Amino acid sequence: MPSPRDPATLLAAARLYYVQGASQAEVADQLGTSRSNVSRMLTEAQRQGIVEIRINDPIGRVHDLEERLRGAFGLREVRVAHTAGPGARPEEQVGRQAARLLVDSLKDSMTVALSWGTNLQSMVYAVTTEVEHHDLNLVQLVGGLSSIANEISGQELVRELALRIGADYRFLHAPATLESPVSTAALLREPSISAALERARQADLAFVGIGSPDHGSSSAIIRSLDLDAEERAAFRAARPVGDLAARYYDAEGRPVEAAVGERVIAVTLDDLVAIPHVVGVAHGRAKTLGVLGALRGRLVDSLVCDEALARSVLSEAGLAPAADTPAAQETP
């Protein structure tokens, strides 16, 4: 009878069972052993790393990271997109996961609010549904982006999503930012703008991109405000790490209003937190501090991100995920 721990015997049993598709009884006959011994050999082959079990998730999620994030931060929903492999585009993978969560969350008579950004653009373009909902409404959390070039505005995203899910929509007819606090205050007094913001505050569900003040469009927002040297210094002294709908916050999720808050046409962070379900969407390690600040401040209830960002957030929080073992990996 072959030794149940001999690597050559374990390899032979594994090839017969996993590659050639033989039953355990057939493996036992070929190796001259019992069926129960074959079962033990296959288990031992996994323990020694001769056999690696890989779970292929057809919808491309990394469930162990989702559970770690959910447990660590008390999140309602977590979707971590697996983005490894040639040609994988993290923003598209994250967008698909966000789109699935959006569709899963829709209900009749619901108002959904959107901010803007690359990840939400990917989400909107990935949305498909055959389910008909009644009395759906879409609104903007932040004004348009007329002062920031090459960005998809909230108006464009709201219109496109409305077409895809059969919803009504309402625009916030105002820029996202202005250079003058006086101009901002005047616009906020306009009935159409104040009414649009009030409708956003009453949303049932919100999807927001999570930004970083030193990268991409969030950095462009700061540049568009034309802050003087003193105002820039005050803003930086407050140590902003991220933004949601052009509203900045520090590492603990506390609002950073210095020089910036009074130049933005958008709901406030307090307004956002009051919405029953807020989903933050982000990809890339550059967003680590922004995502972590939003989680620590409980500014979002749910998170959709890519695998690299999920690992980076856990590591920065001192909750680094254990290294994958050969017998327990998940790939799409």
Image (spheres, helix red, strand yellow):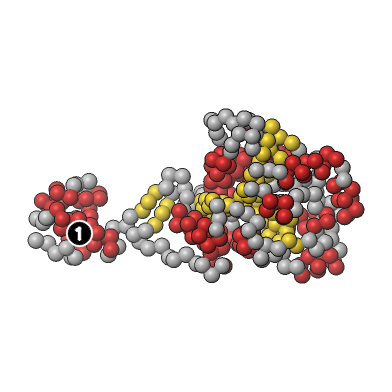
Q: Quadrant of residue 227?
A: bottom right
Where residue 280 appears, as percent x and y from the top left, is 62, 52
- Along the viewing direction, whichever of 329 and 193 lies nearer the viewer: 193
Up/down of 320 relative to 219, above or below = below
Name the residue beneath numbered marker 1: 40
Identify the residue shown where x is 73% and y is 61%. Answer: 255
Q: Residues within 10 Å of mark 1 (few under 14, many from 20)?
A: few
* Vertical side of 116 occupied by 138: above or below: above
**Location of residue 299 with respect to 145 vertically, above or below:** below
Number of numbered discs visible in the structure rendering = 1
The structure residue drawn at horizontal position 43% and vertical position 44%, both measured from the top left corner, is: 58
Q: Amino acid at mark 1?
A: Arg
Q: How far across and how far down the image is residue 80, in percent?
A: 51, 53
Residue at point 64%, 37% (across, down): 110
Q: Quadrant of the N terminus?
A: bottom left
Residue 12 relative to residue 295: left or right: left
